[in-house]
Image (cartoon, helix red, strand yellow):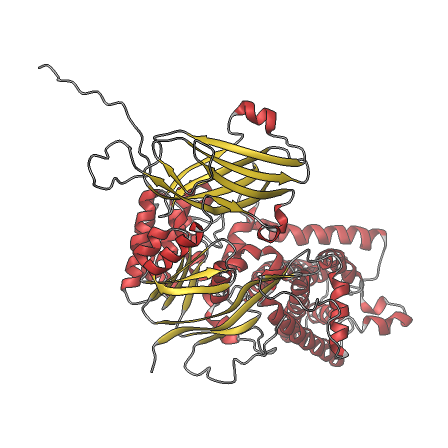
Amino acid sequence: MSNFVISVENVSKAYHLGQIGSGTLRNDLAAWWAKVRGKPNPLLKIGQDIHDNVEGETLWALRDVSFTLEGGSVLGIIGKNGAGKSTMLKILSRVTAPSSGLVKVKGRIASLLEVGTGFHPELTGRENIFLNGAILGMKRVEIVRKFDEILAFSEVEDFIDTPVKRYSSGMYVRLAFAVAAHLEPEILVVDEVLAVGDAEFQRKCLGKMGDVAQQGRTVLFVSHNMSAILRLTQEAIVMEKGRLALRGTSTQAVEYYLSAGAEQAGERIWGAHDVPVNAAPFRPIALRLRDQKGRIVETVRSVEPFSIELEYELTATVTGLRVGIYLSSTRGDQVLTSFDTDDQKRFDKHGTRNAGHYLSRCEIPPDLLNGGRYTLGVNASSYRVKRYFMDEQALNFNVDNAGAPGMQWIEPRSGVLRPRFEWSIGKVKK
Amino acid sequence: MKKAVDSSRQTDSRGWDLVISPRRNLLDLRLRELWHARDLILLFVRRDFVAVYKQTILGPLWYLIQPLMTTGIFTLIFGSIARLSTDGLPQFLFYMSGTVIWTYFASSLTKTSETFIHNTNLFGKVYFPRLAVPVSILISNLIAFTIQFALFLVFMAIFSWRGTVLHPNWWILLTPVLLLMMAGLGLGFGIIISSLTTKYRDLRFLVQFGVELLMFATPVIYPTSSIPEQFQQLIKFNPMAPVVEAFRYAFLGAGTVSFAQLAYSFGFMLVVILLGVIIFNRVEVTFMDTV
């Protein structure tokens, strides 16, 4: 008999777009009355296009997804924002129910969609360990047994009887992760929790995750961090627009995922359906990468300057606006974040922008990036007011090393930067 | 939108510990799951107690100040100024009994009615039996009630010592049943409202003054015996009325009670709980999509 511990069978999940609340009671009653009389729902649109994942008022976050998972395996789930990864995890962790289809699970399942869920700021670290542990599904005796271990892992021993509201954010996250890391379910569902804490703590978390996998437990791991996926999983699935696009070894999946961006060839164009409705009044049009001659390119040279431009439309006046880019390596290392109004003078002048068609261009100096593959993300927001639009993986591009410093040695250089530093060499007199 | 039937109990669910399906059996209470979450329930109770009075000077003393102040004001306004009947009981004790009882019901109802709205973040990130939250609220409120009830007993003792003749009687034995009925009514109404507020926020406002208005339809500040003949029938529909009257009769020896009316309240409670659980069960699985 097969050793499947998870079986996902034709799972779909629909979300209703638009406002929930105003007018829905009337619509609900109308729909209900039609159902009672055995007539079709008057509010449902008919003959909708089923090829896209948006149909009229309904967004299919998941469409007919099926897969099985054997006990003891670690499965990575990758995909762009909005591909349905998080929805899948939400269904697996029973936060929400599927619209159709079934999920069958063998054994205890615990999910880590966010660390520190249910932490109460007024309670002490000790009290929160118990509360959080219980919320995540641990029994009291279990927490008592592992208490010392959790405490040691969190490195906050000295503050354990202080209310967590007095903790630094780092301490808070460490304590939260320490609790989560000591869950011992047969199946663990993890979503991007590693994107917290400092580098050293992240390493510790990855190590702990690796341990969990080695203990023969089943792990589902969602991440944008391709190096973490490659390190922790042997198998992965790629999601695209709510459907399962590919299942294969992690290497295959990561390659598929990265090359899905390569078709874009130096340019990313957003159609009307690609932009969430709540992005208004901001509407991205295109993100382009240009070399120093102004050509749209997919590969830039490390030793030459290039520019990144974002074309967008504002349908209303926006105040405090900043439009910018995220740069990261496709292995998941963050390189930099930069906004067009980072400069105070420019912010004073362009912080408020009227409705219209705009282009924000950023010049990248030569001798900055090391060779390799990079991902550009975009963000348009008004600080502390609203994030209009964000796409962390809008465009992938390559940087070519030819002519960069140190190329006489063919060994690969680690690191994302490849600057041309002025070294001076001299003899020190005794 | 396609809707699949709940096939969790049909084919090949054998050998699986958990089947996640679009719909759940309406009366599938999963009480066993709730029982497994008992540690969590107790920790929620503890959290509510510890957290609420942190950074207050008087701390848990507020549990005593609240009923004392309310009783004092009621005695002043309804007793001394409006001169409402108290069935011949000392005004202070009369109002206090009403306040203590009513507070348990009212706070159980209002707090459980906020279950989904107040826990959106938590519910959106992790699964545990959602009923754990309203149940923990009932328990926290029960502890608060016990404290306030002890205060009431202290005042009863003071009054008898100073010569007031009170007639506590065997009806006292019904106290646990009365508490159960209030808890049940509070929980039932509370979870119905909390389930519906995930979609229709209007109900939140209704609860706020609805509970206040309901108090005036319940013999809290007046005895049933003082109600004019033509309204006597009307008040009998209020399931809380017999509970308050029975409680008062049991401890103070004055009031209008009958088993028939208590049975009506009990039945009412069962219906409300049943309805509440059915609605709660349905909303629980998808409320994250609408809240």
Q: Residue at image x 56%, y 66%?
A: A13
Q: Is residue B199 visible?
A: yes
Q: What is the total number of numbered labels drawn onto the structure image?
A: 0
Camera-side residue of A328 and B272? A328
Image location (x, y in percent) of residue A187: 38, 67
Image location (x, y in percent) of residue B233: 85, 74
Relative to residue A21, is residue A348 drawn left or right? left
Q: Please identify the quarter of the rendering in which residue B160 is found.
A: bottom right
Camera-side residue of A35 and A110? A35
Image location (x, y in percent) of residue A49: 63, 65
Q: Please identify the quarter of the rendering in which residue A322 is found.
A: top right
Give the position of the C terminus of chain A as an image quadrant: top left
Residue with the most extreme bottom position: B11
Vertical order, A6 against A89 (above or below): below
Vertical order, B135 against A300 (above or below): below
Residue with the most extreme left position: A430
Image location (x, y in percent) of residue B243: 71, 71
Camera-side residue of B120 and A68? A68
